[in-house]
Amino acid sequence: MQQAAGTYEQKQYRVMPILISLLISGFVGMFSETALNIAISNLMDVMNITAATAQWLTTGFLLTLGILTPVSGLLLQWFTTRQLFVASLVCSIVGTLVAALAPNFETLMVARVLQAAGTGLLLPLMFNTILIIIPAEKRGAAMGVIGLVLMFAPAIGPTIAGLLIEYLSWHWIFWISLPFLVIGLLFGLVYLDNVSQITKPKIDALSVLLSTIGFGGIVFGFSKAGEGAEGWSSLPVLVSLALGLVGLLLFTLRQLYGKHPMMNLRVFTYPMFVVGLFMVLFCMMIILSTMLILPLYMQNGMALTAFAAGLILLPGSILNGFMSPLMGGLFDKYGPKWLVIPGLVIVAAALWLFSGINAGTATVLIVVLHCLLMVGIAMVWMPAQTNGLNQLPPELYPDGTAVMNTLQQVAGAIGTAIAVSILTNGIHDYMKNAEAAAAPDAAVSAMTFGSQNVFTFAMIVTLLGLVMALFIRRVIVTHPAAKPMH
């Protein structure tokens, strides 16, 4: 797994064409994911499925990512950049086409797995490529541009999906995506260079198996816990989590003491990488828990349409995207501390105010609070992630990106499951009160109570992140980096 550091200093790359080919593909992948989330309610009606079944369109996506992403570090050292890019885009194109033609839930589920396979290959490839072709002192700005493009997709996704559902059908979410994926593939075939070093380390089949059981079991268990009445006490959840924990323990021991580790856990010996990793995980939990509950509350508690809910979320999401390049430039100039700590304070304040919303809350206030939340997240995510990855030597870039992307999926599944459980339990506890249940607006009041509890949970996670952020410091990069071609 060792690579010559000098290789990174000698090579020059066509940075802009490489970035464009990767970002077109990443943009469409993120658009499809968030656009489908706003269509869940419509899919339940059209396909005659329950909420628990519909949730698998998200769970299956996360589960596939949780299984595939840990292997990405190995794949990056076995296959060229172009080979992985083509494989990623082919999976995404086939999955999107199948989804656009899907006549039922089962077919759509298969399509989502194919799309997740494409995304699972593309995201680690993108971040690993950026670490190789961009000098460390310019990575903040580069990561900011990536954040702008990738966050603009989820920003417009819910709004466009709501519009398509209202006037056409949910199939058009995928028909719109398809030509852009084909353009991304053609652009990559022309301009994308092979940037990674192919070392072809020995494949440890047992590590792959343990990784699949460990990460897959954890993601499945947490996702499953958000379904049904039994929740966390159901046998499938308990068995899945137990298998996942045992699998992760054995996987960790195998990586530490095996001759040919699949994932080099030496990345955890770099303290700023660990701090940056936890910042990213906290952000992922906060975003997925709040962005799942807020649209649900607006549609079921405030009686807004999917299109209206999407429009309310649009300003904050766009602001988050445009803040990313600004935060990247400020990170390059000032480092992470003066961005991450104030950012978490803003997020905590926004979530505290969100915990008091009710059916009578003005939509303008929700727009303002969502904008504050998104600005705070932008101040935390990219600076912390870039600072953490900067501390790694070049030979650990594939392992660092694989660890960070894998645990993001796990954190996303955990955040989603806990949010759904808190919401469900809050509604149940409210309705247990016979006097409250008899009220004419009992369902709305119960939804409000459960949603407020979710925002309180997200605020607690933010405060934990704020404590950890006190230890963040700027990394002084000493290892060489690639020089861009002008």
Image (tube, helix red, strand yellow):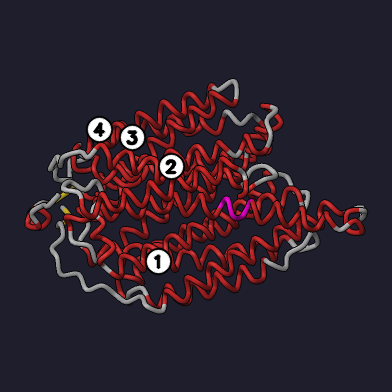
Q: CA distance from mark 4 to mark 1?
A: 31 Å
The mark found on residue 216 in the picture is: 2
Q: CA distance from mark 2 to mark 3?
A: 20 Å
Secondary structure at badge 4 equals helix
Residue 83, given in percent of the width and then of the height, sits at 23, 33
Q: CA distance from mark 3 to mark 1?
A: 30 Å
Q: Residues within 10 Å of mark 4 (few under 14, many from 20)?
A: some
Horizontally, residue 450 falls left or right of residue 3, namely right
Residue 253, given in percent of the width and then of the height, sits at 28, 53
Between circles 2 and 3, the one closer to the viewer is 2
Q: Earlier in the sequence, mark 4 or mark 2?
A: 4
Horizontally, residue 375 falls left or right of residue 212, namely right
Query: Which residue in the protein does label 1 denote?
Result: 326
The range drawn in magenta is 416-420
Residue 348, given in percent of the width and then of the height, sits at 57, 72
Secondary structure at badge 3 equals helix
The answer to whether residue 418 is magenta is: yes
Horizontally, residue 47 falls left or right of residue 401, namely right
Query: Which residue in the protein does label 3 denote?
Result: 88
Q: Amino acid at mark 2?
A: Gly
